[in-house]
Amino acid sequence: MFYLYTIKINDKTFGRFIYSFYICKVNQNRNEMKAILVDVHNECVKPVVIDDNDVLNSMYKHIGCSLVDRVQINDHDDIWVDDEGLLSIDNNSKFFTFGKSQPLCGNGLIMGVDRMGESIDPTITIDKVRSMVKFYTLSDVQDMVDF
């Protein structure tokens, strides 16, 4: 299922974004899971631990949201972001890109995924993530968008 969002700020069209939805089962059989947090507010990439007893709420806490959506970065890893991040943009909003991805609004949480769709530790290294992430302000992203 795909959804198209058009974002307007001060009566100016900011951009159009297409999102697809993916349902992921979460492995609840371990005590903790490793993940990598892309922290846009501190402009850093750091390891975090996901509580296997409450994975979804742990994801919400690290990302800072109440709904998540995924962006696939390779066959084994995904970046989870705030599904409503673009709906609450203001002049203080922060973004990041991963490689050549479109700008993603807010924090991102990198987790692995197995063949059954269950969340697992990421296979990508934190050093690789650090080399591929770039941080942006709203103004930077507006300059990237062709009006």
Image (spheres, rainbow, N blue to C red):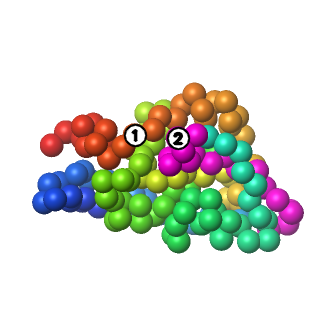
Q: Of label 2 and label 1, which has the lower sequence position? A: 2
Residue 13 figure quarter: bottom left
Say if the magenta span includes residue 32.
yes
Query: Does residue 18 appear left or right of residue 11 in this picture?
Result: right
At a point 54% along the width and 45% down the height, the residue shown is 42
Residue 19 figure quarter: bottom left
At a point 51% along the width and 56% down the height, the residue shown is 81
- Which three-letter amino acid code belongs to the residue tagged 1? Tyr
Tags 2 and 1 touching, CB below 8 Å: no
Front residue of 104/91: it is 91
Image quadrant in which the C terminus is located: top left
- Which three-letter amino acid code belongs to the residue tagged 2? Glu
Task: State the image coordinates of residue 12 (x, y, percent, origin top left).
Answer: 14, 54
Front residue of 36/39: it is 39
Using the rendered image of the protein, determine whether residue 111 is visible from the camera's viewpoint.
Answer: yes
Q: Residues within 10 Å of mark 2 (few under 14, many from 20)?
A: some
Look at the numbered disc 2 and give the secondary structure of its residue: loop
Q: Write down the residue under mark 2.
A: 43
Could you tell me how many numbered marks the image carries?
2
Task: State the image coordinates of residue 138 (x, y, percent, origin top left).
Answer: 32, 47
Image quadrant in which the N terminus is located: bottom left
At a point 33% along the width and 59% down the height, the residue shown is 89
In the rendered structure, which segment of residues is drawn in magenta?
A: 28-44
Query: Does residue 54 appear left or right of residue 110 in this picture?
Result: right
Q: Write down the residue under mark 1.
A: 136
Q: Between marks 2 and 1, how big is the CA–CA gap?
A: 9 Å
Query: Does residue 5 appear left or right of residue 29 in this picture?
Result: left
Front residue of 114/52: it is 52
